[in-house]
């Protein structure tokens, strides 16, 4: 459960976006007090971490106060209040007096929200908090514009903030669209400047980084990521090889009869597929249905088939479970003498068409060879 990995869970019942309202989410819940009560009660009683709730005010003060009392009764740890209604936006004045009224009728902490238009420096936080009577303050837009607003000794120049943000974006491999969007929020009207227009047209991180003289840092980080990726790939390949080796050891220990020949679908018609040939032979001899046991190694598969109490497998790994079963059946029909080995030239020509090497034979030649000698006898 997520409750073990977070400090608390907040239910947003204040989002006024159209998709939220139409979906019965966000601010759509504000006019459904019984549903609000059911949701929050279920969470507070079922979780070990604190649960909080964020709302917008209703047009009528008395209904707003009724709603917050219901919310308080559910056991939430705090309530955040945006001082605007569902239909109001940032150009409308925040109703700080409603937040103050809420603070006076509930005993839980109230978090005041909606004051970004009044907060331009760190000292304004306390002014807004006192005006609303809240225990704390929540902001969004001002923090998006310049996150250094939280500095007690004053905001940093915007260029310094953007440069530091880009350094974080490079360090944590943020994608170009997320990085660009965040910088746009910080620039605001400066998007109309020469540099802002270049940013707006940018579709690569290199362009954005060059605008703030961080192109070399991006190149260094990309090289570092590439090197780490190559090292991880080598470790992954080594792990697959180890799994295959262990599997083959188990196969040898279990005395499973093996062949080393790749199943190529283009070599067979519908009637002479290995599974079809084997099935017809089983019916003719009144034997039990064969059993397939397939294992996956990363993106490759290997199957062991049991026919009449004897196990068969193909040392060549396949790219899907279906082909792995056909490969195991191919091993069985070859060893049982029901089918000859495919010609070597057919093996290589299909490999070239396939464009990939799915074999993992021990000689590491890249091709599963036909081992026509020393085929173990059927017991």
Image (cartoon, rainbow, N blue to C red):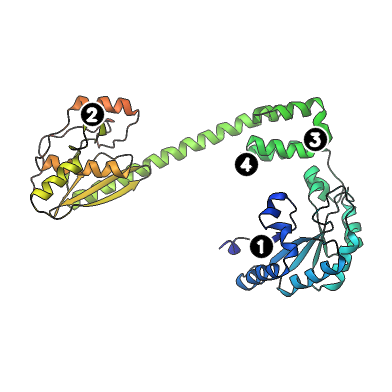
Of the image marks 2 and 3, the number of the one nearer the N terminus: 3
* Mark 2 vs mark 3: in front: 2
> Residue 79: where, in percent of width, then height?
77, 65
| Total residue callouts | 4
Number of other residues with Cα within 10 Å of mark 2, as a class: few under 14, some 14 to 19, many 20 or more: some
Of the image marks 2 and 4, the number of the one nearer the N terminus: 4
Residue in the picture at 19% in, 27% down: 344
Q: Where, by quadrant of the figure, is residue 55 drawn?
A: bottom right
State yes or no: discs 2 and 3 in contact (Cβ < 8 Å). no
Of the image marks 3 and 4, the number of the one nearer the N terminus: 3
Q: Is residue 202 left or right of residue 227?
A: right
Asked whether the viewer can see residue 133, the reply is no
Tell me the tag on residue 7: 1
Q: Where, by quadrant of the figure, is residue 288 drawn?
A: bottom left
CA separation, marks 1 and 3? 33 Å
In the picture of the structure, the residue carrying the numbered disc 4 is 172
Residue in the picture at 78% in, 29% down: 196
Q: Secondary structure at mark 4?
A: loop
In the picture of the structure, the residue carrying the numbered disc 2 is 347
CA separation, marks 4 and 1? 23 Å
């Amino acid at each position: 459960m997520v409750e073990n990995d977070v400090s608390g869970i907040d239910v947003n019942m204040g989002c006024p976006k159209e998709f939220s309202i139409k979906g019965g989410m966000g601010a759509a819940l504000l006019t459904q007090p019984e549903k609000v009560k059911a949701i929050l009660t279920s969470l507070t009683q079922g979780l070990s971490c604190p649960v909080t709730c964020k709302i917008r005010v209703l047009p009528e003060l008395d209904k707003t106060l009724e709603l917050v009392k219901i919310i308080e009764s559910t056991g939430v740890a705090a309530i955040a209040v945006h001082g605007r209604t569902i239909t109001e936006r940032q150009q409308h004045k925040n109703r700080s007096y409603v937040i103050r009224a809420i603070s006076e009728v509930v005993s839980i902490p109230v978090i005041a929200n909606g004051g970004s238009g009044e907060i331009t420096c760190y000292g304004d936080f306390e002014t807004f908090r006192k005006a609303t009577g809240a225990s704390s303050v929540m902001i969004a837009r001002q923090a998006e514009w310049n996150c250094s607003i939280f500095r007690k000794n004053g905001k940093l120049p915007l260029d310094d903030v953007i440069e530091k943000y880009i350094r974080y974006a490079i360090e944590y491999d943020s994608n170009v669209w997320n990085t660009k969007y965040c910088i746009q929020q910080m620039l605001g009207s400066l998007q109309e400047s020469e540099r802002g227009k270049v940013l707006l047209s940018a579709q690569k991180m290199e362009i954005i980084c060059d605008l703030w003289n961080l192109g070399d840092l991006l190149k260094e980080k990309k090289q570092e990521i590439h090197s780490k990726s190559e090292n991880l790939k080598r470790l992954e390949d080594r792990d697959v090889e180890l799994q295959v080796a262990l599997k083959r050891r188990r196969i040898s220990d279990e005395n499973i009869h093996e062949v080393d020949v790749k199943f190529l679908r283009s070599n067979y018609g519908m009637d002479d597929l290995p599974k079809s040939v084997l099935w017809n032979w089983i019916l003719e001899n009144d034997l039990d249905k064969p059993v397939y046991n397939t294992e996956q190694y990363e993106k490759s598969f290997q199957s062991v088939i049991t026919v009449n109490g004897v196990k068969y497998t193909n040392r060549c790994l396949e790219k899907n479970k279906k082909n792995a079963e056909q490969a195991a059946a191919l091993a069985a029909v070859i060893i049982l003498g029901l089918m000859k080995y495919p010609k070597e030239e057919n093996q290589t020509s299909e490999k070239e068409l396939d464009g990939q090497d799915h074999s993992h034979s021990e000689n590491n030649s890249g091709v599963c060879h036909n081992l026509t000698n020393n085929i173990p006898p059927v017991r």
